[in-house]
Amino acid sequence: MSKVKYYYDPETLSYRPIHATNTNRISNFVLFILSSFLFGLFSLLILLNSDWINTPSEVAQKRLIQNYELQFDILNKKLTQIETVVDNIEERDNNLYRDYFEASPIPEARRRAGFGGVNRYKDLEGYDNSELIISTAKRLDILSKQTVVQSRSLDEIESLASNKAALLKAIPSIQPIKKEDLKRMASGYGWRIDPFTKKRRRHKGMDFSANRGTPIYATGDGIVKRADNRSTGYGNHIRIDHGFGYLSLYAHLSKYNVKRGQKIERGDIIGFVGNTGRSVAPHLHYEILKDGVKINPLNFYLDDLSPAEFDAIVNQASQENQSLD
């Protein structure tokens, strides 16, 4: 038996029973269903936007994100290891390789320069892990630039090494006449008495006294620039261009053993001692020029003299005697 509901009638001051019609019953049922649906929908939306309930797709996405975070963490640890290795290579490059080959070290700011101007990482902003992703991307970009800078530096070192080897072979560094063929080191570089005018004159080479026909040797690798007698005072003479700004000159020869344009190596016989040109006795007048300036050849005898022999030549060359040309 259904319960009877009453309402208070103020006119009769009494309670009267409520008689529900079918229309009222249907309206109430519809309202109940609608309110239940709205409540259920509202509750579902709340649950779907909370962490209480996750759909299979959300669970999979969360696992994927966690895996990505783990991979980024591993990547950053590997980046730290690579950065340590690159730092070590850069240190050796600046303090060993470039120092040995007399090249200026690469500034730290240039090696680790960032990327100014437009924000390269704008597309990575606005995500939950944007800071992690942007930080990793920046490290990768800087590391890539460091690698490019270091690669170019090593290319430069390789070129310098190649040039260094060529330079060492080219520098005039042996005595142009063998010790056993040499009578004496007649005159050195500096102020000397001119044998013709008997006045002090700047002697811009070294005179090696030897018998006519004594072999003369190229003091460094190079190309014969001249082999003629068309230069006042030198008589028959040879000029060898060694590259790197170095040129050696051999004067007063009796005859040549090379010709203009010929490529020669250190130790090759290029001519023979004579007494041609402005000369008072058979000897070799030897000069070295660097960038067009005549310098003391004594500073270049590296390969074929012992310390005692070098000291003896220094003492002889320092005497202000009479030159032979």
Image (cartoon, rainbow, N blue to C red):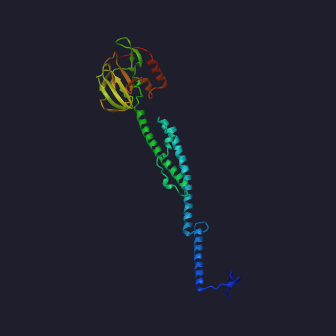
Q: Quadrant of the N terminus?
A: bottom right
Q: Can the viewer see residue 91?
A: yes
Quarter occupied by the C terminus: top left
Residue 240: give x, y in percent of width and height: 35, 28
Q: Percent from the top left, x then y, of residue 181?
A: 39, 23
What residue lies at 59% left-to-right and 78% top-to-bottom?
A: 31
Picture coordinates of residue 50, whole percent (x, y)? 60, 66
Foreground residue among 88 and 189: 88
Residue 45 vs residue 100: left or right?
A: right
Q: Residue furthest top?
A: 198
Count of residue discs = 0
Relative depth, front residue between 243 and 218: 243
- Farthest residue, direction front: 11
For residue 257, say whether it is visible.
no
Q: Is residue 324 left or right of residue 65?
A: left
The residue furthest right is 13
Q: Is residue 189 above or below residue 52?
A: above
Q: Position of residue 259 (x, y in %)?
A: 29, 29
Which residue is rendered at x = 44% and y = 19% of the image? Answer: 317
Q: Against 261, is 147 above or below? A: below
Answer left or right for 248 relative to 111: left
Which corner quadrant of the image does residue 171 belong to? top left
Residue placed most toward the observer, 105 or 319: 105
